[in-house]
Image (cartoon, helix red, strand yellow):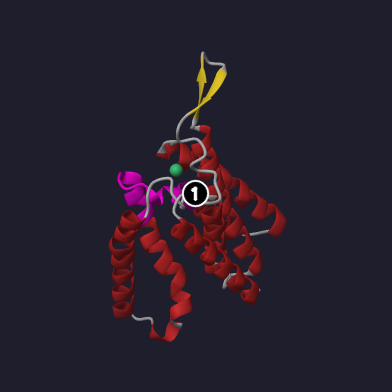
Amino acid sequence: MAGFKTHLTGGVVSGAGISALGLVSYNFNMLQASSIFILGVVGGILPDLDSDSGKPLALIFGILSVLIPTLLLPRITDSKIISPEFLVCYFVGGYLIINYLICGLIKKLTIHRGIMHSIPFAILSGEAGYLLFISSSQNMAEMVGLSVFAGCMGHLILDELNSISFKFGLIPVWKRSSGTAFKITSGNLFATLFVYCLVFGAAAMIFLAS
Ligand SMILES: [Zn+2]
């Protein structure tokens, strides 16, 4: 697989590209463009949530443990009940649940280069980005969704490119890992069906929210 730095660079490039597109197409301000960029970078490393070890995984979960509770905050409560005691319990609770409970579950339930390295997972990640930003504006939600999706797709493509080596610097040779990233199903039927159900469920939510 391509290394963490390669994926980070891929996420930075695609995030910056989509962010620039938002600036030009929708006249976004710098705050909006920066959010699109950051979520594009997150998308670029997201499929490696299924790798069981290393600093990159800890970094991804650390970021998601802060980002997800923050983005969900306006949806689960109104500003009247937000107090320091609520914020302490909410953010510490959210961090612990995502960083330890959900991280542990994902480590247990996924295998590297399983369903998280697939096109439907990239679509699902893009849909999640859209839904988390729908309260901002439809244009913003579209560009965040696109940025996360592009970051994930870039990750899958980089992994596939890394599966090709060149004999004598000329003849392409496909490694055993070839075809395990840019795919539409995993070897596990249950995991595949589960992700497709989530893709269609999220699509229905997007349709209803638009
Ligand atoms: Zn990967």
Q: Which residues are magenta?
A: 42-61
Give how far across and how far down residue 97 sits, in percent: 31, 67
- Quarter where residue 87 is shown: bottom left
In which of the image's four quarters is ligand 1 placed?
Answer: top left
Name the quarter where the N terminus is drawn.
Answer: top left
Q: Within 10 Å of the Cα at label 1, are there few (<14), some (14-19), or many (20+) other Cα atoms?
A: many
* Residue 88 sits above or below residue 105 on the image: below
Query: Magenta residues: mostly which secondary structure?
Result: helix
* Residue 201 sits above or below residue 159 on the image: below
Give how far across and how far down residue 141 sits, in percent: 60, 64
The residue shown at (50%, 43%) is 181
Q: Is residue 26 left or right of residue 6?
A: right
Residue that mark 1 sits on: 41
* Residue 130 sits above or below residue 48 on the image: below
Q: Nearer the viewer, residue 3 or 94?
A: 3
The residue shown at (52%, 66%) is 198
Give how far across and how far down residue 195 sits, in percent: 50, 61
Name the quarter where the C terminus is drawn.
Answer: bottom right
Q: In the structure shown, which secondary structural element does the residue marked by tag 1 occupy?
A: helix
Q: Is residue 162 left or right of residue 25?
A: left
Q: Amino acid at mark 1?
A: Val
- Quarter where residue 84 is shown: bottom left
Q: Is residue 165 part of the magenta span, yes or no? A: no
Q: Is residue 125 left or right of residue 50?
A: right
The residue shown at (58%, 70%) is 134
Q: Nearer the viewer, residue 205 or 188?
A: 188
| Mark 1 Cβ and ligand 1 under 8 Å apart | no
Give how far across and how far down residue 26 sits, in percent: 69, 59
